[in-house]
Amino acid sequence: MNLDLSPAWISIKVTLTATAIVFFLGLMIAWLMSNYNGRWKGLIDGILTLPLVLPPTVAGFGILLLIGKNGPIGNFLEIFGVNIIFSWYAAVIAAIVVAFPLMYKTTMGAFQQIDPNILSAARTLGASEVKVFWQVAVPVARPGIAAATALTFARCLGEFGATLMVAGSIPGKTETIPIAIYFATQGGEMQVALVWVLIIFAISLTVLVINNYWESHKKNQQRGLGG
Amino acid sequence: MEFIIDIKKKLYDFQLDVKLQSKEEIIGILGASGSGKSMLLRCIAGLVKPDQGQIIINGKTFFDSEKKINLSMRERKVGFLFQNYALFPNMTIAENIAFGLDKLSKHEKKSRVSALMEKYHLGDIGKRYPSQISGGQQQRVALARAVAVEPEMLLLDEPFSALDVHLRNHMIRELSELLKEFQGITLFVTHNRDEAYYLSDYIAVFNTGKVEIYGQKDAIFKWPGSLETAKITGCKNIVEATRRSENQLYVPQWDIALRTVMKIEPDVGFMGIRANQIKLLDEQDSQQENCFKVYIADESEGPFRTWLYLKIGSRPKSRADFHLQCEISREQRRHLDNLEEPFIMYINPDYVFFVAQ
């Protein structure tokens, strides 16, 4: 068995980048949306959640339309000689689009669970909105945000359909673990596929378990059960 | 110190329409649950925007619908003590108290926090989290946090409702001491007349979004100015009555005439007498006035007090057949066993009040 480890590094690079971007983007937009009660709320929320319910191939198709050679963003970037389609950046974009609703929805749920009096208390004590967000809302909603981040990470790591459409499967460049599994299986290399399956299984489980232990440790700390 | 509040705000089932102006330091807002009194505090602090009107605290305009002024919560900077205290669960006690003190240097912050912790009897719990301390301690932390930023006004929303009864009495006394030291206006909301009476000299009685009456507490409790005020301040015996002369009224349902100290102006209205102001005498003394023969229809016993349900003039037909409630000590109740029915009830004319319909 001849195993090329590059899919692991590409997967980790793409997943960490996409998770970091989705984390901040999701946090901000969830906070803005939980404070917004205008008439467009339902529509905006629907659009932001859409990638969660659509097949990833639809998301991939949409991204292609935008950043492909003839798409508006693709065209614009062409001026600078930049082509992101079939690069690892495209894989990052695919992961962002597909994972964003998970982060956004879960985080917004966590923000809405916060006792509104706590936020008001912070404001009456003279806190700016930035301070209310970073020092009160985010820490109080932390268990929900941590869960959202773990889910986002797992979703980015496992992203397949949209990635294949916009980034392809160029070995050593855009071939991630899920794509490597698919092509190994197609090519009859069942052992290679199995190794990748076990690796992705280990990474995902590790992240989720670390998240759980860290959260229960934090919770115990605030409840006074040591730590 | 002065505040002027004149606001209107449409609520779900009634309109908040408050006009209140005062120069007092501590004002209790007494009203039934759902009478809009908490909403008033929220409007003052800026949590809720009134539909129209103005709020001026110590000459500073917080809100003015005509001048289009509406300061944000942080610009108003009033101390708000929430019913559930709203401590930051992710911060230690010391961090909670220091939350609003960003403008101070690290050193000043530390000394301010430790001074407050000492003053509010918070001992050495500075490193604990809110969920690790008692309800009474949480209340003191919330108050310390609110006064730490030196607000000009403190708003307390049902400060004792989350506490056990035995802790409550203790905290009322403690809070009353701490409030005396606070240099500013304190408005606190409660549905409990004892709390209102104990903590403040001036009371505004609230009824479905409006200030029913505002004034000195003893005056309000002695002769409430309106029927609702009489009910909210806990008067148990309120009955229709008519005017006979300036100091005499007639109660048709009881078929008795009563002399009053209060001058009676309208022809028809309601008379009231508090349950604890009704006296039962051993024997009829020389003064015949305001004395009546009564029978006990029913009674209920508390640990120290007994409530008697009395009927005037004739034997009650059932336990529900009574005219008025009377509250006496259990000792006085035992003393009645030496006497025979009918007992002699005396209603002190000074405590009889009359309100218009």
Image (cartoon, rainbow, N blue to C red):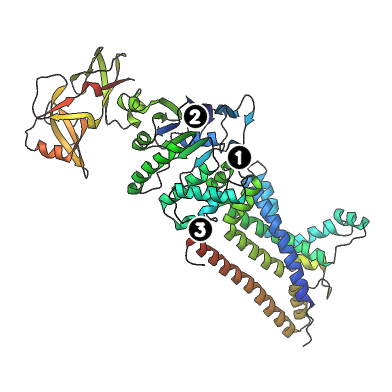
Q: Which mark is residue B74?
A: 1
Residue at the (71%, 66%) spot, across then down:
A156
In the rendered image, which quarter is residue B236 located in?
Answer: top left
Q: Secondary structure at mark 3?
A: loop
Instruction: Give the class, few, some or many, for how many residues have Cα within 10 Å of label 3's Cα (few <14, many ≥20).
Output: few
Measure how far apart labels 2 and 3 are at the Cα level. 45 Å
**Residue situated furthest bottom in the rendering:** A1
Q: Secondary structure at mark 1?
A: helix
Residue position marked by numbered label 2 in the rendering: B15
Asked if the residues shown at circle 2 and circle 3 are in contact, with their CB atoms under 8 angstroms apart, the answer is no
Q: Position of residue B269 (x, y in %)?
A: 30, 19
Q: Amino acid at mark 2?
A: Gln
Q: Position of residue A26 (x, y in %)?
A: 68, 56
Residue at the (29%, 16%) spot, across then down:
B268
Residue sitting nearer the eye, B173 or B300: B173
Q: Is residue A124 left or right of residue B265?
A: right
Instruction: Give the class, few, some or many, for how many residues have Cα within 10 Å of label 1's Cα (few <14, many ≥20).
Output: some
Q: Secondary structure at mark 2?
A: strand
Q: Amino acid at mark 1?
A: Arg
Residue sitting nearer the eye, A49 or B41: B41
Q: Amino acid at mark 3?
A: Lys
A226 lies above or below B265: below
Chain bearing mark 1:
B
In the rendered image, which quarter is residue B51 located in?
Answer: top right
Residue position marked by numbered label 3 in the rendering: B127
Measure how far apart labels 3 and 1 are at the Cα level. 27 Å
Residue at the (53%, 27%) spot, across then down:
B7
